Amino acid sequence: MIPRILLSCLLFAAVSLPSRAEDGHDLWLRYRADPAAATVSTLVTGTGSPTLDAAAAELVRGLRNVSGREPARAHDASGAGALMIGTPRSLPQLATLSLGLERAGSEGYVIRRLAIRGQTVTVIAANSDVGVLYGAFHFLRLVQTHQLADPVDIASAPRTKIRVLDHWDNLDRHVERGYAGESLWDWHKLPGWLDPRYTDYARACASIGINGAVLTNVNANATSLTPAYLQKAAALAGVFRPYGVRVYLTARFSAPIELGGLKTADPLDPAVRAWWKQKIDEIYTLIPDFGGFLVKANSEGQPGPQDYRRTHADGANMLAEALAPHAGIVMWRAFVYSHETPTDRAKQAYDEFVPLDGKFADNVLVQVKNGAIDFQPREPFHPLFGAMPKTPLMMEFQITKEYLGFATHLVYLGTLFEEALRSDTRVKGVGSTVAKVVDGDLQGYKLTGMAGVANVGVDRNWSGSHFDQANWYAFGRFAWDPEGSARAFAEEWTRLTFGNDPKVVAPVVAMMMGSREAAVDYMTPLGLHHLMGTGHHYGPAPWVNDLGRADWNPVYYHRADAGGIGFDRGPGGSNATAQYQKDVAAIFADRRKTPEQFLLWFHHVPWDYRMKSGRTLWDELVIHYTHGVQVVSQMRGTWAGLAPYVDAERHAQVAAFLAIQEQEAQWWRDACIAYFQSISQRPLPPGVTPPAHPLEYYRALAFPYAPGRS
Amino acid sequence: MIPRILLSCLLFAAVSLPSRAEDGHDLWLRYRADPAAATVSTLVTGTGSPTLDAAAAELVRGLRNVSGREPARAHDASGAGALMIGTPRSLPQLATLSLGLERAGSEGYVIRRLAIRGQTVTVIAANSDVGVLYGAFHFLRLVQTHQLADPVDIASAPRTKIRVLDHWDNLDRHVERGYAGESLWDWHKLPGWLDPRYTDYARACASIGINGAVLTNVNANATSLTPAYLQKAAALAGVFRPYGVRVYLTARFSAPIELGGLKTADPLDPAVRAWWKQKIDEIYTLIPDFGGFLVKANSEGQPGPQDYRRTHADGANMLAEALAPHAGIVMWRAFVYSHETPTDRAKQAYDEFVPLDGKFADNVLVQVKNGAIDFQPREPFHPLFGAMPKTPLMMEFQITKEYLGFATHLVYLGTLFEEALRSDTRVKGVGSTVAKVVDGDLQGYKLTGMAGVANVGVDRNWSGSHFDQANWYAFGRFAWDPEGSARAFAEEWTRLTFGNDPKVVAPVVAMMMGSREAAVDYMTPLGLHHLMGTGHHYGPAPWVNDLGRADWNPVYYHRADAGGIGFDRGPGGSNATAQYQKDVAAIFADRRKTPEQFLLWFHHVPWDYRMKSGRTLWDELVIHYTHGVQVVSQMRGTWAGLAPYVDAERHAQVAAFLAIQEQEAQWWRDACIAYFQSISQRPLPPGVTPPAHPLEYYRALAFPYAPGRS
């Protein structure tokens, strides 16, 4: 029988301490009370650095909240259930244990349960303080997902060195292609006000192994390199430092003119070189661990070395030379998009960069998007991967969903990342995956990296929607391990975010795993691409044909005409297929061998072409569009059934967003079918519902205030 | 002795339910546990409307959290400590009690404690459901501020009818002159997603009696009147409706051209009139209780009736006629600012509007800013008040601090509101205060109102800073009672926000009460005005003299020259003083009689003019500038001393902001002294610290990304 006073205590606690709002702010670091989770009696920590202090603080926070009991702090592991964390240097006792620390490398960790003086102790050990921090976060992940069954002997080390978020954030806080509110960086109040959210950002990054943040937009503004703004960036760097997150900036190539008053930004001009050297030295006096620069040059109107008849290598190497003494790096984007219309935009990066292989300085990475166009719902892997053996190529993924439904569509990108990374370049035979190119394994890159265009902003839930948090999470996990599994990461995230109840985990993971294919189907099936609205990229606009240059227009990409649809990139067309290794090229060049998911990317195909299903291309296209909408409807139904198992607050938002997604998927499908039917002049397959409105209705829609504009 | 199980229960509750973050999100509706607060045993509520349900829900939420005990719900008040709420219609028992409900008017309430069948019962009664809601919020205020001592017999009714927030929010979510993040209205996701924050906004408004929200910027965009956007506005109206908050929109005068395809927007053109009538009818089919339009016309480049040689009355009356059948109103702004440079910008509103007195339709209010320039730190009251006896004038205050330090300066505006409202127009003799003009008492206006330019956005704490919440709060309280007390509202807000501990309340109220005078001193003392940076209005720029028209330049306003400083608005100058009632004019026209706080507003005064203090004007100016900074330093000190009594989270942010304020106050003071000294050519008074930098340093500062631009 419960004493009366206890009852009232419980009652008071229940009503007077309102439960934490389930608004998504805690991300996957929720640490909700869980009686089934493993506990820790005593915490023994190495001391001596803010990073180790951060690791200890995170463990205390997490374990206290999960178990309802704060672990005691001690100097020695006595008693069962102790947890020891540190490096051999910070906690010398660890050096005496047989941990296999060589497996951890310079940034990884070992988590091992072993007996010390007859007591079972768990150890989180690493060769560096940040490794301990990563291990602490992983340990908390294991606790929360109930995966700490004996025996415990885990070793993990990141497979890439540079794991960065690229923030396309402007100094006025507008985030280009951002759908989660304004920029996290409150430049106006920096450095005077350090929002606690900066710390939470760094915690979130560290928890998934992200070790760098490019604070500013690739469409760069020289003002970010002025003394006032460097002071602001330095303040952020100070907050991030204990969490192992280094600050990077974008470098506007013409900054020597705009800030330095020079007449040129020619990378071979001595005054220009001196200006950058001085500027970089100035940065390092303020930010001793500054990471370096990300540069978008000679692309979409940005200035660059080609303005002076110099190469990308000339430009990158100038910056690299000035950064090298400080151990800084240059990430030089291969997303080039010249002023002149090329025969096939998909070919341009390869054509410009392959001749430069071997000409970049050692501290330069070339940053390559997963596909050759621009973060479309589906693209074949970029032909540059594997084609520059002497130049480290880093992967650039887009976490923000510029082309995948903004914030309201539930589209898990783990499967997109996985598909790209598992693509086989074959440059060194079967198994030469993009993952192995990126992690350096295939071609021996010394520097390696992965960048994700961030999807975070000041929205309470960081990413604009609860499920978009999973894309940030999966990016970090893939950057750590490019051969990781989208499904495993989805399940991990789901357990951390919605709990371990199998009634929730299984259906949510299933929704996530099917969600990107659904978006491909209702937006751009069978290899179609770049059909979205002009400028804002919101909604369908396959009919647009009047923009200033050919390759801004959707019609340039789908090339639908009375005869068929698709972009001929085979030998009879732009011959972009020839940029791939010859066995791959042979597949992509042959429309019968090309996987149907890429068919219209590589081939112009007659409407009545017979698909593997036996259906005509036209019918298949309509079926795909229709199926995409059906999957979204199914997701809505699945989610509705989860109401008893998910808190009301998050359930309501996801449900509302799924309703929007269903409506917009229908819109995409109907508008595209209406448009393509006006060209194919073919009837819909039997039983298929026609578009709700005539084509003119869709063409007339306008969205002047859609978010995220460039 | 406490049982062991109870101890662990307490421990678990304490550590596993993290306390609510003190991030300011709850505003003054915190409802924190307080054993000293009055409790309610039973709640008896009238039923029958979403508004009564909202009142009951708020009482349950508040009382449960404050007392730790949820009141029982009952149909009858039996037992001591019951609370009955309702109207005589919704709870017929109330009709049998002697409550003095006639005191409540149509929107007010009575809170009374009385005996029913021998039991003490508290009653919140009103003649309308929204009156009950207002009474419920006031009751919760009394509970939290410990002001429910017997006997309780409170009657309160609002003294103005239209109590609105003007949101200068654009459709892309940028808030003009907003310093609290993007607009609350997520237009892109409306109507599909109704952010719970919309409900909290309505709760906050209702809690201080605000009954309307103009959703869109006065610099209006016709797109907000398109069907798609009206659907979005209707969704917001649906959320606000139970809280008595009606939705208003701004009307772009040229919308018949932009949306309707007409060739003119001439208000006397039948096609234009028909277009507006149709548009307004369309709005009311979607929003049956739509409030009406706010219009900025023929001001700062906005289109208006003068484009067609019609008057403001012609324009307003056209809209009013179409709104009248639906009981909608027009709020027509008197802030006119013509394309041509007038002799004195301060005179223009009066000159244009006084001749129109009596010509406006019954459902038009003319909305007048508190002063004749533009929301400066201090202005004399606008000469229009009292000068249009046949036209309801509503007050327009600016809650957002466009000219008062943005989000980081602690400036309580209650004293500014009070000063304006207590100003004596003398149009019907001594005591003809602006408050009595605005509330209709003086000149018998049937329609009355007060508007506040909102300071809210998506920032977690709504207003950009904790103390800026007080300005939203004070605005609402003054709109309810224009003769209210700034000090009383400050104390009320402080108790609700930081608790009832006198160690906190007294110093915080003292800081607030002195804060606006400090800002006047460090920015624009002695009647100076319009010295701020161009465009963004951030920081000092008294030297600016090169803008396109004379009255955009600070030098136009301060007129400093070798002989002296100030704008001669007396009979020998622009004669703006003649716009005031003759006794007031006689004071303002005489530099010896003019209060020194307005001296340089009305007079050009020699540098060596002897002030009441005995000092020269120059010395007095420097002393004021210096004193303003000193007060901020004192505020910092006071706040630092409050650390033991304020939660760490809010304390840290306020402390950081005060440090920024101190720095910027110093900057204002130093830059202005450096500049004016370059003109006065006089030495600083003995003992006064010279500016930290030479004038050129201040002139060179640039802030291209300061927030809140128009």
Image (tube, coloured by chain):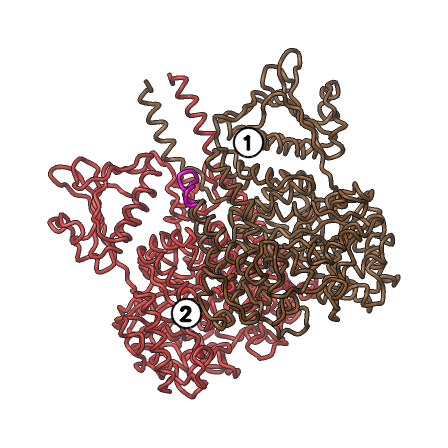
Chain colours: A red, B brown
Of all chains, the one bearing label 2 is A
Question: Crowdedness of circle 1 by 10 Å Cα count: few (<14), some, many (20+)?
Answer: many
Q: Secondary structure at mark 1?
A: loop
- Across and down, in percent, residue A418 comes to 38, 61
Give the image quarter of residue A44.
top left
Tag 1 residue: B145
Which residue is painted at 47% across and 54% down in the image?
A463
Residue A163: x and y in percent read 34, 63
Majority SS type along the magenta span: helix
Residues rendered magenta in the picture: B639-650
In whole angstroms, how far apart are the C-alphas of marks 1 and 2? 48 Å
Q: Amino acid at mark 1?
A: Thr
Mark 2 burial class by Cα count in 10 Å: few <14, some 14-19, many 20+: some
Percent position (x, y) of residue A607?
58, 71
Q: Amino acid at mark 2?
A: Pro
Q: Is A359 or B619 nearer to us in this picture?
A: B619
Q: Quadrant of residue A288?
A: bottom left
The percent coordinates of residue A398 (x first, y second) are 44, 64
> Is residue A654 in sight in this rendering?
no
| Residue linked to disc 2 | A227
